[in-house]
Image (cartoon, helix red, strand yellow):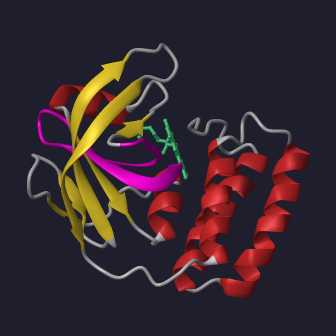
């Protein structure tokens, strides 16, 4: 199983970095697989720690993909790192071992501390739509345009029926990125 999360990592100099990442849930371990090049990869290898944030604020996912990475942070408790200030829960990780790969190294981690901060209040289709659209946006330069348009049209159904203000704002940022790409204002999106 893969959980879509926000990973906060820190450089050895203490500079925090925020990135959406899928986390693979294994029996006793969590597996993070960043594509090279990745600041998250560099930071986790250098500090041997990472923090997973379980948030339903999809603006953080869409924001990170559209240049809005400045989300409020608080110090982690058991590792030298930071967590999102607004998150339902977070887990602090220690890197156990890693497998080198020129495309996508594997970082095997274990949880050393976990905390809940707010209740999970149920699934929301608009949040799913934003997550899927964020993944499309990260692949704009590699997907056929008609596929992007047809998938966005489908995702918009759940958005229109169930979104709140956060989901609408996040969707708007992503659609701005799609429009900018369409008009040749940007030519590069990060890979997933
Ligand atoms: C829902 C979602 C899941 C993602 N999962 C991954 C992932 O597992 N690995 C990865 O390298 N990038 C993933 N990305 C894309 C990264 O967030 C993005 O490329 C980011 O810039 C990673 O590079 P960084 O570590 O240099 O920030 C994901 C993006 C989204 C929206």
Is residue 150 in sight in this rendering? Answer: yes
| Figure quadrant of residue 93 | top left
Of residues 15 and 163, the one nearer the viewer is 163
Query: Percent from the top left, x then y, of residue 157?
Result: 80, 76
Magenta segment: does it hold 145?
Answer: no
Q: Total marks drawn?
A: 0
The structure residue drawn at horizontal position 79% and vertical position 38%, both measured from the top left corner, is 143
In the figure, residue 83 lies in which quadrant?
bottom left
| Position above or below: 44 against 67 | above
Q: Position of residue 19 (x, y in %)?
A: 40, 48
Q: Is residue 191 above or below residue 59?
A: above
Say which residue appears at 13% left-offset and 33% top-offset. Answer: 12
Magenta segment: 1-27
Specify the farthest residue to the front: 27
Look at the picture and state if 111 lies above or below 35: below
Whether residue 67 is visible to the viewer of this picture, yes or no, is: no
In screen coordinates, is 50 left or right of 119?
A: left
Residue 42 lies in what quarter of the image? Answer: top left
Residue shown at 9% from the left, 58% from the top: 77
Q: Is residue 9 magenta?
A: yes
Residue 106 on image: x %, y % = 41, 26
Is 78 left or right of 56, judged from the image as shown? left
The quadrant of the image that shows the C terminus is top right
Please state if 148 lies on the left or on the right of 172 as rendered.
right
> Who is closer to the viewer here, 187 or 127?
127
Q: Main secondary structure of the magenta part?
A: strand
Q: Tell me the residue at 26%/66% (across/down).
A: 72
Whole-percent x, y for residue 166 in the image: 52, 79
């Amino acid at each position: 199983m893969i959980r879509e999360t926000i990973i906060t990592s820190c450089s050895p100099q203490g500079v925090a970095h925020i990135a959406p990442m899928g986390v693979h849930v294994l029996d006793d371990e969590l597996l993070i697989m960043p594509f090279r090049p990745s600041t998250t990869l560099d930071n986790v290898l250098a500090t041997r720690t990472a923090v997973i944030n379980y948030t339903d604020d999809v603006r953080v996912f869409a924001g990170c993909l559209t240049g809005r990475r400045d989300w409020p942070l608080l110090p982690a408790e058991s590792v030298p790192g930071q967590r999102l200030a607004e998150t339902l829960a977070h887990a602090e990780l220690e890197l156990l071992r890693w497998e080198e790969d020129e495309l996508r190294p594997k970082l095997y981690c274990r949880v050393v501390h976990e905390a809940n901060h707010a209740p999970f209040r149920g699934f929301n289709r608009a949040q799913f739509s934003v997550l899927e659209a964020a993944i499309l946006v990260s692949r704009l330069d590699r997907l056929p345009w008609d596929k992007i348009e047809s998938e966005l049209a489908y995702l918009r159904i759940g958005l229109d029926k169930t979104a709140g203000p956060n989901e609408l704002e996040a969707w708007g940022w992503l659609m701005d990125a799609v429009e900018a790409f369409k008009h040749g204002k940007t030519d590069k999106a990060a890979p997933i």
